[in-house]
Image (spheres, rainbow, N blue to C red):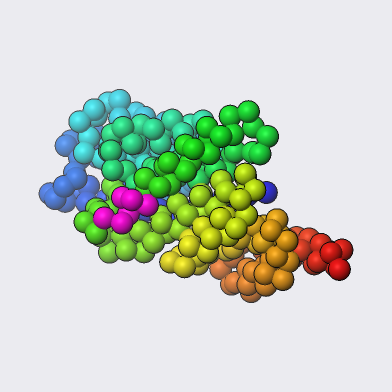
Amino acid sequence: MKIRFTTCAVLILPLALIAQTQQPKAKSQKELDALKKVQADQQAGNWDAEIQDINSVLENFTDTQFKDQLLNMAMNAAQAKNDYEQTIAFGERAMQSDAKNVQARVLMAEVIAQHTRENDLDRDQSIKKADDYANQALTLLKDPAAAPPAGVPADRWPEFRKQLGAEAHDALGMTDDTVKKYPDAITEYKAALTDYPNAVTMTHLTKAYIDAKQYDDAIATADKVLAMTDASDNVKQFAQQQKADATKRKAAAK
């Protein structure tokens, strides 16, 4: 089981920027109203309406200065409603629009890694895609001059940059796990946790420890998740199941 990494991407259109004279900005009142509608959909968590209204903006305002941000928002909305095909489609559009779109590459790596199974006929091709996207993202993130993704304020960029790097390593860990390269998976998950500690990657690390028969490490990592105050209930429940599994396997191995 792989738990989805919940991104903290800044998805809400910053109305202060839309209304002000600095770039980007709406070029008409009609565009501004359409952008506000997208924002309202996002704030309400109405992903289908958000995607529909984003498509409407892109179709009716072809020269909008918010194109890259809207595509990132659509990609995240599709992921939020667990629509794999739509997430991939918007991710590809986002990368076509912005060749250095690191956010799209990270999300593509994550969702492909999450949906790839050991016995898939196209497993190797999918793993290569996920790994390529993750490594491309890490290369872009290493550039000290890398600009924040569209819609991400400059003051949020340093923290978001760390999370994107963590998600890229998390994706690499998942692909290693899928092909049973457990030591490599453990290394990638640890790299992810170095800069951005989070409960989801810790459950992935716990699974890798179990698969590698490192049961004490698995139990200790699961305990850390259970002690985290910001971990969601479903993540903690999964960690509890992992701990029980590791404990059972440890006893059977004696």
Residue drawn at the location 63% of the way across and 28% of the way down: 121
Magenta run includes residue 141:
yes
Up the image or down, 173 lies above or below 75; here it is below
- Rendered image quadrant of residue 73: top left
Split into 4 quadrants, where in the image is the C terminus?
A: bottom right
Q: Is residue 48 magenta?
A: no
* Residue 211 percent location from the top left of the image: 70, 56
Q: Please name the residue shown 24% across and 59% down the image.
A: 144
Report the magenta stretch's main SS: helix
Residue 111 higher or lower than 160, as above or below = above
Which corner quadrant of the image does residue 133 belong to?
top left
Residue 20, image x, y percentages? 16, 51
What's drawn in magenta, residue-wise? Answer: 138-143
Q: Is residue 6 visible?
A: no
Where 228 falls versus 185 (above or below)?
below
Q: Farthest residue in the left direction?
A: 21
Can residue 188 be seen in the rendering of this structure? yes
Tell me which residue sits at (19%, 45%) in the image.
24
Choose top left, top right, bottom left or bottom right for residue 96: top left
Q: Position of residue 156 (x, y in %)?
A: 32, 62
- Write the residue at 45% across / 58% down: 166
The picture places residue 207, in percent across and down from the top left corner, at 67, 57
Q: Nearer the viewer, residue 66 or 84?
A: 84
